[in-house]
Image (cartoon, rainbow, N blue to C red):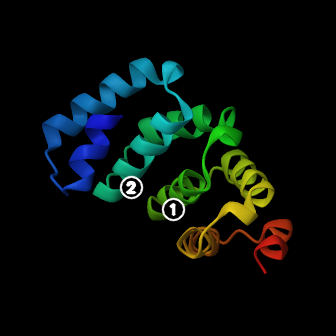
């Protein structure tokens, strides 16, 4: 996850490396922390790669530990889903609940990213929208 994040941070796209990262991530995803799931989701979305098996696995892996994510990682995960056009209903609902619970901890950038992500995914989560307003 950290390797994917680092290469995405410098916008270095190497197809064989990404294929290796994807394969390794799929094999270890059950061992990933919430932070690692958020980082690799962000990296995949930043590269614009639509690796369906990896994104599907990340969506499943992200639901359980979602409450452990910081506001920034909640916003980044939502952004990753929107950027990749991945509308996983279970994860989106979990993100909305966790973000609503932590809305006072979000900065303006995080709120903006969260709002953009939910709008891009055409999700109208009333409790989250009311908490943000």
Label 1: state its secondary structure.
helix
- Image coordinates of residue 89 in percent, x first then y, are 70, 51
The correct choice, above or below, for 25 with respect to 40 in the image is: above
Whether residue 56 sits left or right of residue 97 in the image: it is left
Per the rendering, the mark at residue 22 is: none
Q: Residue at x 45, y 58 (%)?
A: 84
In this rendering, the count of numbered labels is 2
Q: Residue at x 61, y 68 (%)?
A: 114
- Image coordinates of residue 33 in percent, x first then y, are 52, 28
Estimate how packed mark 1 is, as few (under 14), some (14 to 19) or many (20 or more) residues with alpha carbons within 10 Å.
Answer: many
Where does label 1 land, which residue?
79
Where does label 2 land, which residue?
45
Q: Residue at x 74, y 65 (%)?
A: 104
Label 2: state its secondary structure.
helix
Which is more N-terminal, label 2 or label 1?
Answer: 2
Locate the N terminus by quadrant: top left
Locate the C terminus by quadrant: bottom right
Whether residue 103 sits left or right of residue 19 in the image: it is right
- Image coordinates of residue 76 in percent, x first then y, are 50, 57
Q: Are marks 1 and 2 in contact (CB under 8 Å)?
A: yes
The image quadrant that residue 119 belongs to is: bottom right
Q: Residue at x 45, y 63 (%)?
A: 83
Distance, label 1 to label 2, CA atoms, is 8 Å
Observer-nearest of 87 and 61: 61
- Image coordinates of residue 82 in percent, x first then y, are 52, 63
Estimate how packed mark 2 is, as few (under 14), some (14 to 19) or many (20 or more) residues with alpha carbons within 10 Å.
Answer: many
Observer-nearest of 123 and 9: 9
The correct choice, above or below, for 110 with respect to 90 in the image is: below
The image quadrant that residue 10 belongs to is: bottom left
Q: Farthest bottom residue?
A: 133
């Amino acid at each position: 996850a950290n390797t994917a994040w680092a290469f995405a941070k410098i916008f270095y796209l190497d197809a064989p490396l990404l294929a290796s990262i994807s394969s390794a991530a799929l094999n270890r995803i059950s061992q990933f922390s919430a932070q690692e799931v958020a980082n690799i989701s962000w990296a995949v979305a930043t590269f614009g790669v639509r690796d369906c098996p990896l994104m599907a696995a990340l969506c499943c892996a992200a639901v359980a530990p979602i409450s452990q994510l910081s506001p920034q990682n909640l916003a980044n995960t939502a952004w990753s889903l929107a950027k990749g056009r991945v509308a996983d209903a279970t994860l989106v609902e979990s993100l909305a609940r966790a973000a609503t619970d932590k809305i006072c901890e979000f900065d303006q950038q995080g709120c903006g990213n969260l709002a953009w992500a939910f709008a891009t995914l055409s999700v109208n989560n009333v409790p989250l929208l009311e908490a943000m307003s």
